[in-house]
Amino acid sequence: MTATWDPTAPGVLRLPSGRLIRGRGLRHPLPEGVTPDFALYLLGKEPPGVDWESRWLRWPDFRLPTDRAATAAALHEAWERSETERVEVACAGGQGRTGTALACVAVLDGVPGREAVAYVREHYAARAVETPWQRGFVTRFGG
């Protein structure tokens, strides 16, 4: 088992199960300390390579992911791996797409879809999930 994130570190979301996932914006410098074991990058174009295992989902800014099935599979993988690994979810700014993905992961962890956006805004970032269609995506996710 790999060490997990520091639960008090900025950007680390504690799910109801106790799993920890770090959300961040790729426009900001990589936080000091340990690096992810696995990362899920949500961008309109392919991100630069990193020294850890990563997966890229084509997800344009302020929009929804282009491949819903691949997104569901990737979010499920991130949730599963967060039980024993340091998982990071990131987009450019760390709010809209990242918040939407974290809210969907919270649904996988047992948070009702209609409550997941509020959960992520309370426990991750107050401005997470930026658009009405992102909120709708979370509400419908897994349902």
Image: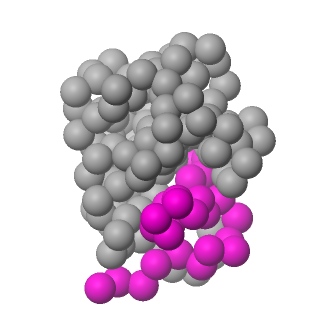
The residue lying toward the viewer, choosing from 72 and 67, is 72
Q: Residue 81 colored magenta?
A: no
Looking at the magenta stretch, what is its main secondary structure? loop
Query: In which image quadrant can residue 31 be found?
Result: bottom right
Q: Quadrant of the C terminus?
A: top left
When the figure is inspected, residue 53 is found, relative to residue 103, above or below; the finding is below
Across the whole image, how many numbered discs are drawn on residues? 0
Left or right of residue 127, residue 74 in this image: left
Q: How is the image coloured?
A: one colour
Q: Residue at x 29, y 23 (%)?
A: 68
Can residue 51 be seen here? The reply is no
Can residue 84 be seen here? The reply is yes
Farthest residue, direction top: 133
When the figure is inspected, residue 37 is found, relative to residue 78, above or below; the finding is below
The residue lying toward the viewer, choosing from 14 and 89, is 14
Left or right of residue 88, residue 30 in this image: right
Q: Position of residue 105 (x, y in %)?
A: 43, 46
Query: What range of the chain is rendered magenta?
Result: 1-26
Q: Residue at x 42, y 70 (%)?
A: 86
When the figure is inspected, residue 68 is found, relative to residue 115, above or below; the finding is above
Left or right of residue 24, residue 110 in this image: left
Q: Position of residue 109 (x, y in %)?
A: 41, 52
Q: Position of residue 70 (x, y in %)?
A: 23, 32
Q: Position of residue 126 (x, y in %)?
A: 77, 41
Q: Residue at x 63, y 45 (%)?
A: 120
Query: In which image quadrant can residue 98 be found?
Result: top right
Q: Residue 21 colored magenta?
A: yes
Q: Residue at x 57, y 48 (%)?
A: 26
